Image (cartoon, helix red, strand yellow):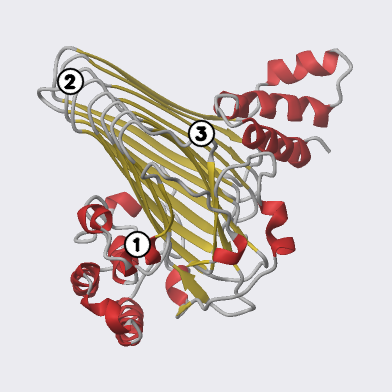
Amino acid sequence: MVERAEGTRITMNQNSDIKTWYIKNFETFENNLNGESTKPIHQIRREAISNFSKLNFPTNHDEEWRFTSISPILKFNFELGERVDLKTSQIKKYLFKEIKGNILVFVNGYFSPSLSIIKKYSDGIKVGSISEEIKNNSSIINQHLGKYANYREQIFTALSTAFTIDGAFIYIPDNKIIEEPVQVLFITSSFGKKIISQPRNLYVAGKNSQATIIERYVSLDEGVYFSNVVTEIIAGENSKFEHIKLQEESSSSFHISRTEVDQERASNFTSYSISFGGEIARHDINSRFNDEGGECSLNGLYLIRGNQLYDTHSLIDHAKPFCNSHENYKGILDDNSRGVFNGKVIVRRNAQKTNAFQENKNIILSSGALVNTKPQLEIFADDVKCSHGATIGQLNEDSMFYLKSRGIGEEKAKAILIHAFASDVVKTINVEEVKKYLEEILEKRFNK
């Protein structure tokens, strides 16, 4: 029998009250926009808040949320975060110093020019903030923002879209390459206030382009706050795009994020979603092949303990033939933590010669930890190669015995096996400094 999460009931009054709170906040937000309310993006905001008012927050009666209760999030009336000035010394430890490329820093969801480092390009490459592009009435923003993440049916996406104010913007024109990885750092500094931060990111990679983005979420304190993130990625024809997302927020915080990827002909998209933080953290990541010859690789590692809950929902849509996808998610759970994995691969009727592989493996380190995993294949074509699998278990007893028989202590043996388990995901990351950082976290956590 599958165990369901406890304490999941959301009353009609609770649903209505929290929606009323955000709608009232939108009115204040709208009144402070001044001239920006005339921009095309604001019509999308207004449509989004209208949809938000009609939608309900999900409960465990909704199939997509059956193991993840958001009732703890709805206990708080989160306020819009304020701009905060930080010093460079306060953020140094969150940056990968060996990477010499662009650095975009956002504090409570707002771009901080003084903390950021942006290179000047003469070939059409743009690296900056969404707010600046909105101000300039960017044609790229008008063409792409809000076109992929569904704010008509997803309530958290509707909420994010309604309050779109800032986030990372990266545009790579046709035949251009950003050589060094771009670091995008989101810092929350709540000072004890219950705030909501809603970064809105847009990455557009043109034909034959290439880029790597490191998107990192951290906090300066252990306060209660809510990060509601939406990222839209457009991978143009024959482009190569790597997206690394590190979620390391306060263990008292909530993190809901959606990543939508639009893949064109022969594009190659690789994602790494690494999660350590948050009381409740959920990542919905969806990719769609719009033409032939595409490659998509979704990788994840969640390392949770205490009463943390981490939920991954993924969808790879093979809408066209001759495309390949690979999905590899691993979880390491301790104490009373909860993990959820729901990965769906759809192979549509005309998507012949599809090759799709999906796997989710979990290690349970305590009797109180629990994982609910559901890999899914929906195949409507007949000339395909598809497979999926999921495992939940403890550390291999034979392997532990072998290591201990060689004079290795129990804790060291445990650390070796956990590192080997996680390395399938970590070792494939192309950015050496990120790879080294993750290996150090595993070493510190388990090699006591």
Kind of residue at disc 3:
Glu
Q: Percent x, y for residue 302?
A: 55, 41
Which of discs 2 and 3 lies nearer the camera? The answer is 3
Q: How many marks?
A: 3
Residue to which mark 1 is pinned: 133
Q: Percent x, y for residue 252?
A: 60, 65
Q: To which quarter of the image does residue 83 belong? A: bottom right
Secondary structure, mark 1, is: helix
Residue drawn at 33 percent across, 81 percent down: 33
* 313 sits left or right of 55 in the view: right
* 259 sits left or right of 337 in the view: left
Q: Percent x, y for residue 9?
A: 38, 68
Dot 3: few (<14), some (14–19), or many (≥20) neighbours within 10 Å?
few
Say which of 318 and 30 sits in front.
30
Q: To which quarter of the image does residue 287 belong? A: top left
Say which of 115 and 328 sits in front.
115
Residue to which mark 2 is pinned: 321
Residue to which mark 3 is pinned: 179
Secondary structure, mark 2, is: loop
The answer to whether mark 3 and mark 1 are in CB contact below 8 A is no
Say which of 248 and 12 sits in front.
248
Give the spatial CA distance, label 2 vs label 3: 31 Å
The answer to whether mark 2 and mark 3 are in CB contact below 8 A is no
* Image quarter (top left, top right, bottom left or bottom right) of the N terminus: top left
Q: Which of marks 2 and 3 is nearer the N terminus?
A: 3
Kind of residue at disc 1:
Glu
Secondary structure, mark 3, is: loop
Numbered mark located on residue 430 in the image: none
Kind of residue at disc 2:
Pro
* Image quarter (top left, top right, bottom left or bottom right) of the C terminus: top right
